[in-house]
Amino acid sequence: MTDVVRLEHRGEIALITVNNPPVNALGHAVRQGLLQAFQSAEADSQVRAVVLVCEGTTFIAGADIKEFGKPPQAPSLPEVIEVIEGSSKPSVAVIHGTALGGGLEVALGCHYRIASRDAKVGLPEVKLGLLPGAGGTQRLPRLAGVAKALDMIVSGTPIGAAEAVEHQIVDELFEGDLTEAGLAYAHRMVEEGRAPRRSGEQTRGLENADNEALIRAKHAEVVKRMPGLFSPLRCIAAVEAATKLPLADGLKRERELFVECLNSPQRGALIHSFFAERQASKINNLPSDVKPRPIKTAAVIGGGTMGVGIALSFANAGVPVKLLEINNEALQRGLQRARDTYAASIKRGSLTEEAMERRLALVEGVTEYAALADADVVVEAVFEEMGVKQKVFEQLDAVCKPGAILASNTSSLDLNAIAAFTKRPEDVVGLHFFSPANVMRLLEVVRGEKTSNEVLATAMAIGKKLKKVSVVVGVCDGFVGNRMVFQYGREAEFLLEEGATPQQVDGALRNFGMAMGPFAMRDLSGLDIGQAIRKRQRADLPADRDFPTVSDKLCASGMLGQKTGAGYYRYEPGNRSPLDNPELAPMLEAASREKGIERRELDEQYIVERTIFAMVNEGAKILEEGIAQRSSDIDVIYLNGYGFPAFRGGPMFYADSVGLDKVLARVKELHARCGDWWKPAPLLEKLAAEGRTFTEWQAGQ
């Protein structure tokens, strides 16, 4: 045994306990300890059954991330699981918390499985560009069937214990003490004379289904919904092997496909994303003794789509929240919007009516600022205009209790100016949610020049409570996400003046991996929003710069996107599918003619570089200015808020992978041809000259 795995004898039952805080990860010592413990139990003639249990808050939650990128050490996990499954003594895994990745594969190696009612099981390797490599793709289909195995393995999404029982992944649920439940189950196995029931020998999940049709359907779905992703198709191929090959051959095929994924460049990007998200929660130069303020109640100002989404985020987290509107009529619309949002979740099957009513009971509508006097945090989500924000914050300053956090959901305005409308700027912070706020994971936490450390720490704690991916950013026009997406959108529109169509630009960027093209995204959000920002920004533009004009022409014609039935695309009533807008072509011709540009054919690589490299160049400026703490924070923002393809790691990681010398060469070329919008960032020039990357600069500055 090892220090992290303990073997005890409880009469004729061998009790194997894993204790490797914080999540019982499958590091070398755990693998070695499990191997030795199961071998000892097998060799002991007094042992008639084996119980595997974990201490702490969870079962084995997966691989040890500290071993990522290091040479493998024997025993490998497949070797350990082969010994567990091959034992002649029946074994039971006692699952609580989460059994993920290799943790679930260990449990599948045991002959029986029981789980606490709130436990979850899953195989999330695909999210790291891999596939389950220790038998998960072979054993799970044999138990749960091909359809469920494909859903779990290709999505990487865990399922609850009750669902695991329904699909025969888990044998039964238990309540109470883990060890006692495991021992009781083991005694039952002995009394009933149960023999080992090896998952790898099961066939029930492969019977009575058209497995070939299921494989074909999932393959077609992945090609359509996950274009460019490497590992999901290998996951499908591995599950297909389980339907056609005996276990030994299937495991061999799984290993071959696992190695293909391991060697894919996408894996490096996805691993980067994994660590970047964890790094984002760390705040540079924040004293370790700073404690967040308690947040027991919240309030949101504004009952529009964004305000309601923020209020529901608090309700979903179990935090009572007051929703303030200017009058009862507007308030009732907001409350109905909240109910309708939950009703849509019920229709999709992701929420029960009981849960809806429980959450709605936490949302209280009010029309007077005085009702917010006891709120611990108030989030303003009103119209994006400084005069409107001023009135709100002056009233909040007057009524909110000392120590209350006053937060703005502004997406681009100067948070320091907003804080100056109060007598307590140290309590003001930006909480920039992304729409729909109750769904989108990203939260930009904007640190003003006077925001206190305590308030900053509390804002990050709020994000964690709301299950958001929170990233600290500084104050500038658009912060990080919108400041960079402005460059992206501007260059996309310049491409229209050069000769492209919205379909060509959107198609090229979707092929690159973006969730939506820039013009479909603009139509969705409304072209008037961008026009308001351009109007404000034009006042400060240097004389040698201007914006493209196609969007202005659309707005002048009353075509604002989906809300009006036409924008860059045309939309049929009740249908959001983008169609060709015949009124756009003459506008494109006019825009090119006004600029003296001869329209020409543009290839996909040029379209991608023109838009993505504009973001990268701006990201380098953001890093130099200290608006973002680290380049990986920029990647986290784009992966979670802007639909950047995870398999490319984010814009800054993507630039590193291309080579900063190549990125700089294109930026310089565009600077010479297109003007100072493309002036190279000094940091980009410096790193390219030194042969370094943004990631290396982040680590060593």
Image (cartoon, rainbow, N blue to C red):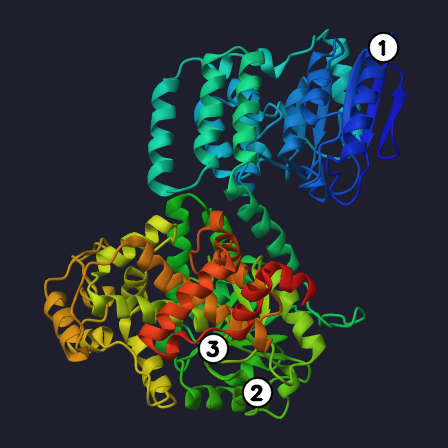
Q: Where is residue 82 in the image (x, y as percent from the top left)?
A: 69, 17
Task: Please tell me which residue lies in front, 499 or 450.
Answer: 499
Q: Earlier in the sequence, mark 2 or mark 3?
A: 3
The quarter of the displayed image where residue 19 is located: top right
Q: What residue type is labelled 1?
A: Ala
Residue visible at 83% across and 23% down in the picture: 15
Kindly check if marks 2 and 3 are in contact, taking CB atoms under 8 A apart as contact. no
Q: How far apart are marks 1 and 3 (CA)?
A: 66 Å
Tag 2: residue type?
Ala
Give the mark nearest the N terminus, 2 or 1. Answer: 1
| Residue 421 appears in the rendering | yes
Provide the residue designation for mark 2: 419
**Residue 276: x, y in percent?**
61, 56
Name the spot of residue 77 as percent of width and height, x first.
69, 26
Q: In this view, does 379 lie to the left or right of 590?
A: right
Residue carrying label 1: 43
Q: Which residue was labeled with disc 3? A: 410
Three-letter amino acid code at the position of disc 3: Thr
Instruction: Sort mark 2 into few (<14), some (14-19) or many (20+) by Cα contacts within 10 Å.
Output: many
| Residue at image coords 34%, 26% | 216
The quarter of the image holding the N terminus is top right
Rendered-image quadrant of the C terminus: bottom right
Q: Report crowding for label 1: few under 14, some 14 to 19, many 20 or more residues within 10 A (C-alpha).
A: few
Q: In this view, does 401 lie above or below 28?
A: below
Alpha carbon separation for disc pair 2 and 1: 70 Å
Q: Residue 158, image x and y in percent?
A: 55, 38
Of callouts 1 and 3, the N-terminal one: 1
Judge whether 272 appears above or below 669 on screen: above
Q: What element carries label 1?
A: helix
Regarding mark 2 in the picture, which secondary structure is present there?
helix
Between residues 447 and 693, which one lies in front from this camera angle?
A: 693
Find numbered disc 3 in the image and state the secondary structure of the residue it sits on: loop
